[in-house]
Image: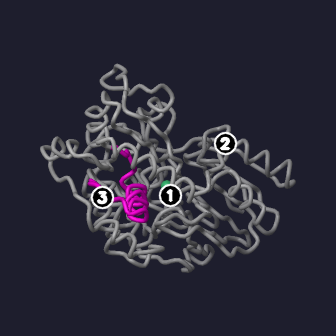
């Protein structure tokens, strides 16, 4: 007998965490934070009970709570090299901006690194005698993986975040999978089909050029990890020649990316994309940066703070400028409010935005069609467990799997235990 305990990330994006237990062993799959909650942590588990941690990728909704496991414990943590390097940057930044509320500090972040076990795609990791975990490329961001867990003759596939289509940074996932018994899968975009990528790239570059030709500045609020670099690659691919500025934590992530060629689909493109850009190192230079027409890429991706918010406020009142949103916006975030109302929440009020606001769906997640095809492609008769999505999204996938494919489905809430 075994079980899966759902710690978080159920019918919600954020706080991903799943504990798989069998034969007195426990492995933890991801342990992220909720980005919009006062208490950001998923359900707690005792670190001493954890035999191994598998971290699919470094985004904080999958990794931000990991330091909690190192306050009193030291479980081995399996991740790719690039994931571990960017994780440190992300966690240190998270610590800096939320120190007051966090029960951990640099010591725990260092401890994660001390217990890091480097893994690569194709590796099969044994935990005790009973667990085999296979590391499979997830196509989401450089170094991201899905975990295939075999225990007691059952196979559980935990997708983490997946993308099945190519982006400029990484190739889409094309896993060759055995029969699966339980599919724990992300559902972020279960209600949305993404537009064809090339067409989207061209629309984006045309919109950027239009603003720049009028002498305006395009602000692109983007996640520091991966989306910022994807946008840089698009600008390079289409020979964008005006000023390009990279601000905030994205600089540090780019420096790490440039040291790890093997994780990229086209490393030359990535390198060229970084060759002509300017890095903003100090606040003072931000004032100068917005005086020249061009593109500024800056986190936070949902405009919840950081350099992006600074620039957005400076650019808001001039219609020559543009604010182009390029990623998922959680409900209630300033970026989502801006898209829905054309106004930017600032200091408790709403700022009228004259600058052009546009949305480009440069997602690194599988869209509705791909998610459905992925379920269909799975051999065996898996129980489908949609997670990591707003409730309607998870429900949609569950209904598709049960009505169209006749599969068993589960829609767990945080705290639920699934017997396997
Ligand atoms: Zn992710």
Q: Does dot 1 land on a helix, a strand or a loop?
A: strand
Residue 111 disc label: none
Query: What residue range appears in magenta?
Result: 218-245
Q: Which residue is mark 1?
A: 30
Q: Is residue 141 left or right of residue 102?
A: right
How far apart are the alpha carbons under marks 3 and 2? 31 Å
Mark 2 or 1: the one toward you:
2
- Indicate if the residue with disc 3 has its beta carbon within 8 Å of ligand 1: no
Q: Which residue is mark 3?
A: 89
Residue at 74%, 73% (x, y): give it: 153
Q: Which residue is mark 2?
A: 393
How many residues crowd mark 1 within 10 Å: few (<14), some (14–19), many (20+)?
Answer: many
Lower sequence index among marks 1 and 3: 1
The percent coordinates of residue 363 (x first, y second) are 53, 53
Q: Nearer the viewer, residue 43 or 309?
A: 309
The percent coordinates of residue 76 (x first, y second) are 43, 69
Quarter-wise, where is residue 77 in the image? bottom left
Magenta-colored stretch includes residue 244: yes
Lower sequence index among marks 3 and 2: 3
Q: Nearer the viewer, residue 402 or 320?
A: 320
The percent coordinates of residue 219 (x first, y second) are 34, 43
Q: Is residue 410 left or right of residue 20?
A: right
Residue at 45%, 27% (x, y): give it: 342
Mark 1 or 3: the one toward you:
3
Q: Quadrant of the N terminus?
A: bottom right
Q: Does dot 3 land on a helix, a strand or a loop?
A: helix
């Amino acid at each position: 007998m075994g079980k899966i305990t759902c710690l978080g990330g159920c019918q919600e994006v954020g706080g991903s965490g799943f504990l798989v237990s069998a034969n007195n062993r426990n492995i933890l799959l991801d342990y992220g934070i909720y980005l919009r909650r006062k208490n950001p942590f998923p359900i707690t588990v005792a670190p001493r009970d954890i035999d191994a941690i598998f971290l699919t990728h470094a985004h904080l909704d999958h990794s931000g709570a990991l330091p909690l496991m190192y306050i009193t414990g030291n479980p081995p943590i399996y991740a790719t090299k690039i994931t571990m390097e960017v994780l440190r940057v992300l966690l240190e930044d998270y610590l800096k901006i939320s120190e007051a509320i966090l029960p951990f500090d640099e010591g725990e972040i260092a401890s994660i690194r001390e217990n890091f076990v480097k893994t690569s795609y194709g590796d099969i990791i044994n935990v005790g005698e009973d667990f085999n975990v296979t590391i499979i490329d997830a196509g989401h961001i450089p170094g991201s993986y899905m975990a295939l867990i075999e225990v007691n003759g059952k196979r559980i596939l935990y997708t983490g975040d997946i993308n099945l289509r190519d982006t400029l940074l990484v190739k889409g996932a094309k896993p060759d999978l055995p029969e699966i018994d339980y599919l724990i899968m992300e559902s972020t975009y279960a209600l949305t089909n993404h537009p064809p990528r090339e067409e989207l790239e061209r629309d984006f570059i045309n919109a950027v050029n239009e603003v720049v030709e009028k002498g305006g500045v395009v602000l692109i609020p983007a996640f520091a990890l991966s989306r910022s670099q994807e946008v840089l690659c698009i600008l390079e691919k289409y020979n964008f020649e005006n000023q390009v500025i990279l601000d905030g934590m994205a600089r540090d992530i780019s420096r790490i990316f440039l040291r790890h060629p093997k994780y990229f689909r086209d490393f030359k493109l990535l390198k060229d994309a970084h060759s002509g850009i300017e890095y903003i190192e100090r606040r003072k230079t931000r004032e100068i940066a917005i005086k020249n027409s061009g593109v500024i890429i800056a986190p936070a991706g949902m405009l919840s703070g950081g350099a992006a918010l600074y620039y957005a406020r400076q650019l808001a009142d001039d219609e020559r400028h543009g604010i182009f949103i390029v990623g998922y916006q959680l409900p209630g975030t300033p970026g989502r409010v801006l898209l829905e109302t054309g106004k930017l929440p600032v200091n408790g009020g709403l700022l009228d935005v004259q600058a052009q606001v546009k949305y480009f769906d440069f997602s690194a997640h599988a869209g509705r069609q791909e998610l459905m095809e992925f379920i269909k492609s799975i051999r065996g008769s898996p129980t489908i467990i949609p997670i990591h999505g707003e409730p309607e999204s998870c429900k949609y996938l569950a209904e598709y799997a049960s009505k169209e494919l006749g599969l068993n489905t589960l829609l767990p809430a945080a705290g639920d235990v699934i017997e396997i």
